[in-house]
Image (tube, grey):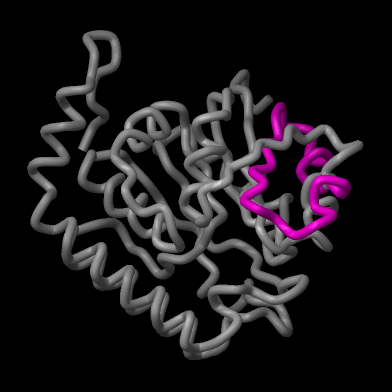
Amino acid sequence: MYQGKTVSVVLPTYNEKDSIRACILGFEQTGVVDEIIVVNNNAAEGTSQEVAGTAAIEVMESRQGYGSAIVAGLRRSTGDLVCICEPDGTFDPVDIFKMLPYTNDVEIVYGTRTVGEFIWQDANMGWFLRLGNWGVAKLMEVIFNTNSLSDVGCTLRVLNRQAVDTLLPLFKEMGSCLGAEMMVLSRITKLRSVQIPVNYRARVGHSSVTGHWIGAVSVGLRMIWVILAYRGQARLIRARAVGKQTDDTPMVRA
C-alpha cells in the first residue's frame, strides 16, 4: 500500500517472455504493490510458465492489441492506484516511487522517456523516435492547452481509481494508440495530470511496433489522427463524462 491506498500494476504482454518474470519480481520487491495483473494477449509460448510461481494474476485477453490488453487489465484491477507498465525490460519498477507522491495532487501521472539524462545506453530512443514523440506531444499540448508534455508513447503511468472509472467507458483505440488516446481523454474530461521523466533502458527482445521505422511512423501518424479527431469531439465527450457522474462522485477540478 501507499499512504493507505492499495496499488495495482497492469502488465500487458505479447512478446515479453524473456523479461516478464524479472519485471514482476521488481514490482514485488518495491513493497508497495498489492496486486500485479499480467494480461496475456496471445503471448509468446512459455509466457504463462514465466508468470507461474510469482504473485501475479494472469488474465487472458484474446482480442489482439496493446489497447485491448491494457483495458482488460484496468477492468480487472482493484487498486486505489493503478500503474501500467510494459514488462519488456525498458522500465524500472523502482520508478513507481517517484510517481506515487504526485498522486496526492493529480489523477494521472504520466512518464516521459525523452529526457536525455534518463535514456540508458542501447535504449530504443534514437533521435528519430525521440523527436517524433516530442513533436506529437507538443501538438497535443497546443491543441488541448495541456500542461507541458514531451512524450505520447510512454506506457509507464499511474492512475487513481477515479481516472480509471472515468476513462474506461470512453476508450475506442484498442491498438498501439491507446496511450495517446488516454492522454487526450484525460484532458477533455478535466482529469488533472503531470508528466515526469522515467528511466528508459534497452528492450529485452524485439518490439513488433517500434522495432522498425515503418512501424514507428505508422503509429505516429495514427496518434496524430487521434489527436485531431478528438479535437472536434471534445464537447460531446465531456458531456458524456459529466452525465456519468453521480452525486457522490463530483467532477474533478479543472
x and y, in percent, of residue 155 in the image: 53, 57
Direction from residue 145 to residue 83 in the image, left or right: right
Q: Is the residue 206 above or below the residue 152 in the image?
A: below
Residue that appears at 31% across and 48% down: 172
Most foreground residue, 3 or 134: 134
Quadrant in which the N terminus is drawn = top right
Direction from residue 177 to residue 157 in the image, left or right: right
Residue that appears at 36% across and 50% down: 182
Is residue 241 part of the magenta span, yes or no? no
x and y, in percent, of residue 22 in the image: 84, 54
Q: Is the residue 39 above or below the residue 160 in the image?
A: below
View extreme (right): residue = 53
Residue that appears at 42% across and 33% down: 164
Q: What range is drawn magenta here?
A: 26-50
Most foreground residue, 146 or 52: 52
Residue that appears at 64% across and 43% down: 39
x and y, in percent, of residue 147 in the image: 29, 57
Quadrant in which the C terminus is drawn = top left
x and y, in percent, of residue 152 in the image: 41, 65
Q: Quadrant of residue 240?
A: top left
Direction from residue 19 to residue 171 in the image, left or right: left
Q: Is the residue 185 above or below the residue 74 in the image?
A: below
View extreme (top): residue = 247
